[in-house]
Image (cartoon, coloured by chain):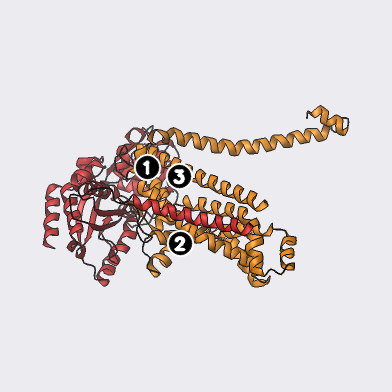
Amino acid sequence: MVFNNVGRTVLALSISSLLFVGCSSTNEIETSSTSSLNGTVEIDGSSTVFPISEAVAEEFYSQYPNVRANVAVSGTGGGFKRFANGETDINNASREMREGERLAAIDNGVEFIELRIGTDGLSVLVDPSNNYVDCLTTSELKNIWEPGTKIEYWSDLGQKFPEQKINRFGPDTDSGTFDFFTEKINGEAQVSTDQYQASPDDNVLVRGISGTKGSIGYFGYAYYQENKENLKVIAVDDGRGCITPNPTTIADGSYSPLSRPLFLYINVESLNKPQVKAFVDFYLTHGAKLANEVGYIASSDEVYAANQRLVNTK
Amino acid sequence: MTDENFNKQYDLAPHSRGRRTKSIIFYLLLLTAIGVSFTGLLSLIIEISREGLPWLSWHFLTEFPSRFTEKAGMKSAIMGTVWVISFTALIIIPVGIGAAFYLEEYAKKNLLSKIIEINISNLAGVPSIVYGLLGLSVFVYYMGLGRSVLAGALTLSLLVLPIVIVVSREAIRTVPESHKQAAYALGANRFQVVYKIILPQAIPGIMTGTILALSRAIGEAAPMIAISALVYLTFVPTNPLDRFSVMPIQIFNWISRPQDEFRGLAAAGIIVLLITLIAMNALAIYIRNRTQTRSEE
């Protein structure tokens, strides 16, 4: 009977696997639809823009339950690779498209438009017990973050600072935030001191900065907003006085140079698909409100109106 | 038995002071070892439960993701995991067992098979993201499967196959040589020996290996992020070529959000993942015990 037992076990195992598969499919059809629109909208790209696109997709779903609006997170660069292949309809981007990416898209016959949807203010943070720094100039920031930096103690920056060891925290080198910060502060993207604790997870940075004496670090404004009580934000002076990041200074661009634009890139051919067109229209109608809701600073109504006109001409 | 009785029985007392002290020290060392690993596990479970239990509810299992913590659920991630792990099981069970039998019973013991053996053991140590990138270029693009359940399952299969093969071989090796010889003596051919003599006795061990492998697969985030990348989706897969998300991707996404409440959701997601794991392990132990008693009949 040994043979039968084995056979039965293997059979039972395969059947139970199949059953798992079988029962999942029964859950599929669930929402009755008022709209006949269906199909797929593929969105990929920046993790920074993700919360906005996710919010839009969620609201869109409640109105068009039969459309699959899939929002993935491959990073701005990873997303552009797929976008340039025509794999995705929309790419979330936390920087402008690079020349190489543009050429790749053109090579593949992918025509696209760029929509500015909002702004993020990269914030420079120190631990909350820090009472000796309120504002740093961009050249002081560069001294701290440039490759081969000589700053080991805050006092190395100048007499007004105490002899406290400086502990740097920042996003790791795959991050668009890292690209942007190094480009604006050190003058070249991806060029930075390696004397810092890197993490791809901004929450790790939040905890590191708030719990370490003499710390300094940077990340997106949304993370600062959510952790205000554990962090102290530093004003940045690029020659026009100390400006603290807040919705006003980020929106009008006076928080410079660390205000970073957020974009959507739309595959023009995809706009022929009714579900994609509906999604983009929906984005441009509700995106501003939702961007503010998730912690960014939306572009002005005029910009959104101009975006809508641009989409309508395509 | 008390120490005194023990000592009396074996007449150890007068001479064994030093040895007894050593034995007690050794016992305490072992106690510390289990204490350390248990405390680690316990503090993890307590911490996760404290953060996650308040978020655990029925709708957490039946709703799609949302930017509102109170509305968010992991239905798409749970169903994605079920799909991917089911297909992974369907792939690794026959392939893993087949490879193990080939290496143990069929392959000639020469340099080539030695090299293959060493490589399989080494493959078990390759970082999982490497498999993710391999799967992305081979299954997703080259084979044109897209970012589908099937591509995910194939990638996870590659990742955990070494475990299945290594453990299955160990199980096959425990079958006494005398049983095989007896079967051959009765005129059985090699297939009959493998299928009727070795497999039934090795099944418990093979099952343990398979479940260990699937337990690892279910918790993998890195290769799944490379293959799927999908975080927000409002459907569950209906066929092997559908897009999908899995629980670790969802948990990872929740952890990396700025809002603190999402950490609670992530903890709740980890609890669901842990329960799934425990259920799978329990199923494996059940099947193992069942086959064990049956094959001894």
Residue A147 left/right relative to B295: left
Separation of marks 3 and 2 at Cα, in angstroms: 21 Å
Amino acid, disc 1: Leu
Output the chain of dot 2. B
Sequence-wise, which precedes: disc 1 or disc 3? 1
Separation of marks 2 and 1 at Cα, in angstroms: 26 Å
Q: Residue drawn at (49%, 57%), measured in percent from left and top?
A: A14
Identify the colour of chain A in the image. red
Amino acid, disc 2: Leu
Identify the colour of chain B in the image. orange
Q: Quadrant of residue B63?
A: top left
Amino acid, disc 3: Leu
Marker disc for residue B273: 3
The residue under label 2 is B154
Could you tell me which secondary element the residue under label 2 belongs to?
helix
Residue A186 left/right relative to A89: right
Other residues around mark 2 within 10 Å, as few (<14) / some (14–19) / many (≥20) = some
Towards the viewer: A230 or A80: A80
Vertical side of A56 occupied by B184: above or below? below
In front: mark 2 or mark 1?
1
Sequence-wise, which precedes: disc 3 or disc 2? 2
The residue under label 1 is B61
Q: Are dots 3 and 2 on a single chain?
A: yes
Residue A314 drawn at (x, y percent)? 14, 63
Please report contact status of discs 3 and 2: CB closer than 8 Å, yes or no.
Answer: no
Sequence-wise, which precedes: disc 2 or disc 1? 1
